[in-house]
Image (tube, grey):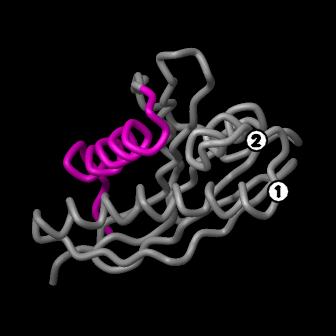
């Protein structure tokens, strides 16, 4: 397994930024990547999507309850105060759109990946992986309405 570099991380960042701008109408500020344990408090929502193919692992999109409601409100074009089934579906679709866009960028660079359907988690949870470390990139909404943390726990398959 090869380690990830900027050309493997940037497609996820570009996809997340574009989808958040297009679907949530917010400008996004991307922070410096850090290694961080995927441990979340009781007020967090986490979208988990698996990656297979030439890269393997998972991507997590984590947000507070407040950010989740803000994102769902913008996507559904109505005020969301509680994440119900409709808002949950919107958040899951956000994950699908981000990962689908990232897969398209990888494909255009001749890297084939597939994604699993999203799993949405709420509450205090910790995702442990012994496969690889979690690279976390905070993405803040420039309008002050919150943000998300993008966790990448991926390894590229060695070409044989």
Tell me the element at label 2: loop
Q: Is residue 160 above or below residue 13?
A: below
The residue where tag 1 is placed is 84
Q: CA distance from mark 2 to mark 1?
A: 9 Å
Estimate the x, y position of residue 66 in percent, counting from the top left: 75, 31
Q: Quadrant of residue 107?
A: bottom left
Estimate the x, y position of residue 10 in percent, counting from the top left: 27, 44
Residue 120 horizontal side relative to residue 85, left or right: left
Q: Residues within 10 Å of mark 1 (few under 14, many from 20)?
A: few
Residue 6 horizontal side relative to residue 55, left or right: left
Q: Quadrant of residue 145?
A: top right
**Residue at far left of view:** 109
Residue at (73%, 61%) from the top-left corner? 86
Queried whether the magenta region covers residue 7, the answer comes back as yes
Residue at (31%, 74%) from the top-left corner? 113
Q: Which residues are magenta?
A: 1-26
Tell me the element at label 1: loop
Q: Is residue 14 above or below residue 146?
A: below
Residue in the foreground of this view, choosing between 20 and 78: 78
* Image quadrant containing the C terminus: bottom left
Residue in the foreground of this view, choosing between 38 and 1: 38
- Say whether marks 2 and 1 touch (CB < 8 Å): yes
Queried whether the magenta region covers residue 59, the answer comes back as no
Residue 2 horizontal side relative to residue 150, left or right: left
Q: Residues within 10 Å of mark 2 (few under 14, many from 20)?
A: some
The residue where tag 2 is placed is 80
Residue 101: mark:
none
Residue in the foreground of this view, choosing between 42 and 89: 89
Estimate the x, y position of residue 36 in percent, counting from the top left: 59, 38
**Residue at far bottom of view:** 160
* Image quadrant containing the N terminus: bottom left
Residue at (86%, 49%) from the top-left corner? 123
């Amino acid at each position: 397994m090869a380690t990830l570099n900027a050309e493997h991380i940037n497609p996820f960042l570009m996809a997340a930024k574009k989808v958040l701008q297009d679907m949530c109408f917010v400008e996004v500020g991307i922070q410096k990547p850090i290694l961080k344990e995927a441990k979340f408090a009781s007020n967090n929502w986490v979208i988990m999507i698996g990656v297979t193919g030439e890269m393997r692992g998972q991507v997590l999109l984590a947000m507070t309850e407040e950010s989740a409601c803000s994102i769902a409100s913008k996507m559904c074009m109505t005020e969301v105060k509680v994440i119900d089934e409709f808002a949950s579906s919107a958040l899951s679709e956000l994950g699908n759109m981000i990962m689908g866009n990232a897969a398209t960028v990888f494909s255009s660079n001749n890297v084939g990946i597939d994604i699993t359907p999203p799993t949405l988690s709420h509450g205090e949870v910790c995702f442990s992986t012994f496969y690889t470390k979690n690279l976390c990139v905070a993405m803040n909404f420039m309008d002050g309405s919150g943000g998300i943390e993008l966790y990448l726990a991926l390894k590229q398959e060695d070409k044989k």
